[in-house]
Amino acid sequence: MNRESYARGGGSLGRVWAMLLRYLYLLRSSWPRTLELIYWPTLQMLIWGFMSQFLYVNSNYVFRAFGVLLAAVMLWDVLFRGQLGLSISFLEEMWARNLGHLFVTPLRAYEWVAALLSMSLIRVLIGTVPAALLAVVLYHYSIFSLGLPLIGFFAVLLAMGWALGLAICGMILRHGMGAESLAWLAVFTLSPISAVYYPVSILPRWLQHVAWALPSTYVFEGMRALLFQKVFRADYLAAAAALDIVLLALGAWVFYLSFRGARQRGALLQMGE
Amino acid sequence: MPAPAIEVKDLVKRYPSAIAVDGVSFTVGRGVVAALLGGNGAGKTTTLSILLGLLLPTSGAVRVLGEDILRHRYRVLARMNFSSPFVDLPHRLTVRQNLLIYARLYGLRRRRERIEELAADLQIGGFLDRPAGKLSAGQKTRVALAKALLNEPELLLLDEPTASLDPDTGDWVRSYLEAWQARTEATILMASHNMAEVERMCSDVLMMKAGKIVDRGSPQALIARYGRANLEEVFLHIVRKPEPELEAVS
């Protein structure tokens, strides 16, 4: 065989596609993992759907807009699944001790990150779309009734999930698999202060300042404004997008520093369980 | 005249608690099969990791196939490859899926054809569609070689290429690598603890100890220099000799 007959071609997108293909093969090879993606959002939607039905006749809050809790649950899942989707694909490489193989190829770190982000989007869609459709069937509530703002809410929450995911992956690169639990738990600490199920005004005043520093808070407040007052708060979405840019820059910076640190320590060849 | 396959100058890798590589300098010419020998912790894997761009050195210069690997690793990574029995391919993907992904990462065209060709060559066709985690040690080694040869590398770095293989499979792998190298004239640098393998395959041996290269030459030259019967005896002599009696060479 002559060296020229397999001339190297394909650029950055080809390598991103290669990594994305790897994660799709992994997903396809294990039906429990695919089922798990659908299971939790669906289960959450069922629990909160029934709770909404109950509160509908008992609470003025839900009476004002039946879908408020369901929409909150489903949007929260975008943030949670966005972060987890990125972290799981990253952890797949840790569990397989595969970084040593990957980074002796021409794969760049940013190409790997692009594949991780793409896989996160795929996981979010697999997880949330069936749950959203089931809500239409069971409760006659469609989150798509939020209209075009839904795209903005979705994008902001997904980007926030990516920023968190990048920072968490960086922490795992820096501290090893001992930091793995961050991937599963970190985002939940933001749930109470993101005002997912209740208005931010319920929080103690000092905590409200923290809450308004999170893009997710603007999304959930914006969602309630849309459902209750039928008003789209573009200012909220703009603030959330601006905060996302800051968070994404921070997440990418943590990831970059940790990746470089792993190369300095020789951890890429040894990293694993 | 092309640049040497590997040029290392004053390479140092210092960790907070130890010096893994301590001022190493060497070159490996094109088309040479060379070995890095040394006891555990001598600095072989650290040196290989730096050559692969996986590890950043504390100081020193490293050129691979004429390119500065520390500054322009992406210019050269597509022209080299690496195989180690200690780093498995992902277990849950089939052999074919793994090879397809790496073929894409190396930017190969006609990927399926290349995989079929390697499968026939390395006799892995029978288990291309089996998960990589369900292969025997010998099968894994052949699959790892297929991955390492996908891009027809000009420089192949091997870490213990026949570790944990039975003598028959080990001999098969050595014969395959010899034939492949003769055909492609690629450069091979291997780290190995199998002295018979090094004597058979390598024309150039770099002996490492405590992060330094303490001797260098062909297996025959080293055996003659130390007045021993084989390379294993030379290795034992060097490894057991107190350090002050050894001087670093470049």
Image: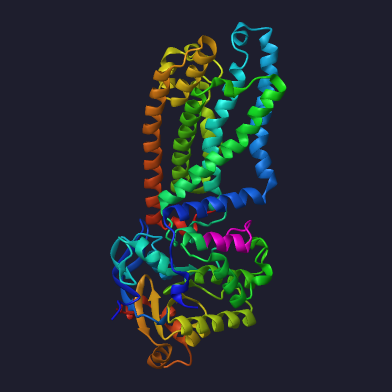
Residue positioned 60% across, 18% down in the render: A69
Q: Nearer the viewer, residue B68 or A142?
A: A142
As drawn, B191 above or below A37: below
Residue B158: image location, x then y, percent: 48, 72
**What stretch of residues is rendered in magenta?**
B88-102
The reply to whether the magenta stretch includes residue A86 is: no
- Residue A230 position within the rendered picture, expressed as x and y whole percent measured from the top left: 51, 12
Q: Nearer the viewer, residue B193 or B66?
A: B66
The quarter holding residue B172 reads bottom right
Q: Is residue B241 left or right of residue A271?
A: left
Q: Quadrant of residue A132?
A: top right
Looking at the image, residue B115 lies above or below residue A67? below
* Frontmost residue, B132 versus B123: B123
Above or below residue B142? Residue A85 is above
Q: Position of residue B165 (x, y in %)?
A: 61, 75
Residue found 49% across the figure and 33% down from its top: A158
- Whether B90 is among the magenta residues is yes
Q: Is residue A272 above or below residue B206?
A: above
Q: Residue at x 43, y 82 (%)?
A: B185
Residue at image position (39%, 55%) is: A263
Horizontal arrangement in the rendering, residue A165 relative to residue B137 (left or right): left
